[in-house]
Image: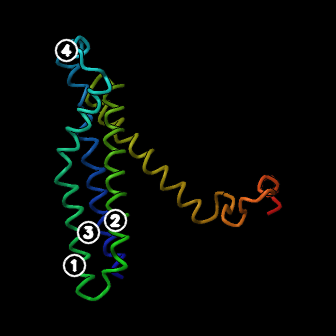
């Protein structure tokens, strides 16, 4: 269907963003260590949080063409859907897909910066950033899959309501009676 076309395009662009983000930012602070600039950074009046935001913004600027390609892919898929008369159902998928890709890219950039701050060499930061990104994104995917397949137990919040017996219903769920 048209929605699947948008979702598949967004997934490929999101995968590209997740592949490039750690590679681009893994040397954010390790090159400061390698060039012995870290002491000069510490002596400046720039707070550490501002340094991190600056490195993250620099990585976002470099990833901007990939994110623009994501939006262009989604718009092209919406154009195809509009041609065949189904653009109304594709717009929410496009918005959610674009938001998901942005969140994935920011998560991968943050993982790369964490690895860069903690590792002393670029090689260690490179591999650690991909490992952290895999754990962060893969772990969320696995958890969501388990919940969707009803393997991981979760309460049916909508059926429980918010009445005065809410806690009694929650306790009965925990005891396995629901």
Mark 4 or mark 2: whose residue is earlier in sequence: 4
Q: Image quadrant for the C terminus? A: bottom right
Query: The N terminus lies in which quarter of the figure?
Result: bottom left
Mark 1 near mark 2, Cβ–Cβ under 8 Å? no
The percent position of residue 154, horizontal first and vertical second, equals: 66, 57
Q: 50 or 177, which lies in front?
A: 50
Q: Nearer the N terminus, badge 3 or badge 1?
A: 3
Q: CA distance from mark 4 to mark 3?
A: 44 Å
Say which of marks 3 and 2 sits in front: 2
- The span from disc 1 to disc 4 (Cα, nearest Å) is 51 Å
Tags 1 and 4 in contact by the CB under 8 Å rule? Answer: no
User: Going 27% across and 52% down the picture, which residue do you hit?
Assistant: 17
Q: Residues within 10 Å of mark 1 (few under 14, many from 20)?
A: some
Distance Cα–Cα, label 3 vs label 1: 9 Å
* Label 4–label 2 contact, CB within 8 A: no
Numbered disc 1: secondary structure: helix
Residue shown at 59% from the left, 60% from the top? 147
From the image, state whether disc 4 or disc 2 is nearer to you: 2
> Viewed as shown, does residue 135 lie left or right of 80?
right
Residue 13 in percent (x, y) is at: 26, 60
Between marks 4 and 2, how big is the CA–CA gap?
Answer: 44 Å
What is the crowding at mark 4: few (fewer than 14 residues within 10 Å), some, or many (at least 20)? few
Q: Tell me the element at label 3.
A: helix
Quote the CA–CA distance across marks 3 and 2: 9 Å
Q: Which residue has dot 2 on it?
A: 95
In this orientation, which residue lies closer to the viewer: 170 or 13? 170
Q: State the residue position of label 3.
A: 74
Question: Residue at horizontal 38%, vertical 63%?
Answer: 96
Numbered tag placed on residue 36 in the rendering: 4
In this rendering, the label closer to the viewer, 4 or 3 = 3
Mark earlier in primary sequence (1, 2): 1
Secondary structure under badge 2? helix
């Amino acid at each position: 269907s048209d929605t699947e076309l948008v979702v598949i395009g967004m997934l490929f662009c999101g995968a590209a963003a997740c592949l490039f983000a750690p590679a681009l930012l893994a040397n954010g602070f390790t090159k400061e260590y390698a060039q012995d600039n870290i002491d000069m950074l510490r002596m400046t009046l720039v707070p550490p949080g501002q340094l991190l935001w600056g490195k993250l913004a620099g990585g976002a600027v470099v990833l901007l063409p990939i994110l623009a390609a994501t939006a262009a892919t989604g718009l092209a898929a919406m154009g195809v859907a509009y041609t065949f008369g189904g653009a109304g159902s594709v717009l929410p998928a496009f918005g959610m897909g674009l938001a998901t890709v942005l969140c994935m890219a920011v998560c991968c950039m943050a993982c790369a910066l964490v690895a860069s701050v903690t590792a002393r060499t670029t090689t260690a930061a490179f591999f650690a950033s991909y490992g952290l990104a895999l754990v962060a994104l893969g772990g969320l995917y696995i958890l969501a899959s388990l919940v969707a397949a009803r393997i991981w137990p979760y309460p049916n919040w909508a059926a429980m309501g918010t009445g005065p017996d809410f806690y009694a219903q929650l306790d009965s769920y925990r005891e396995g009676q629901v």
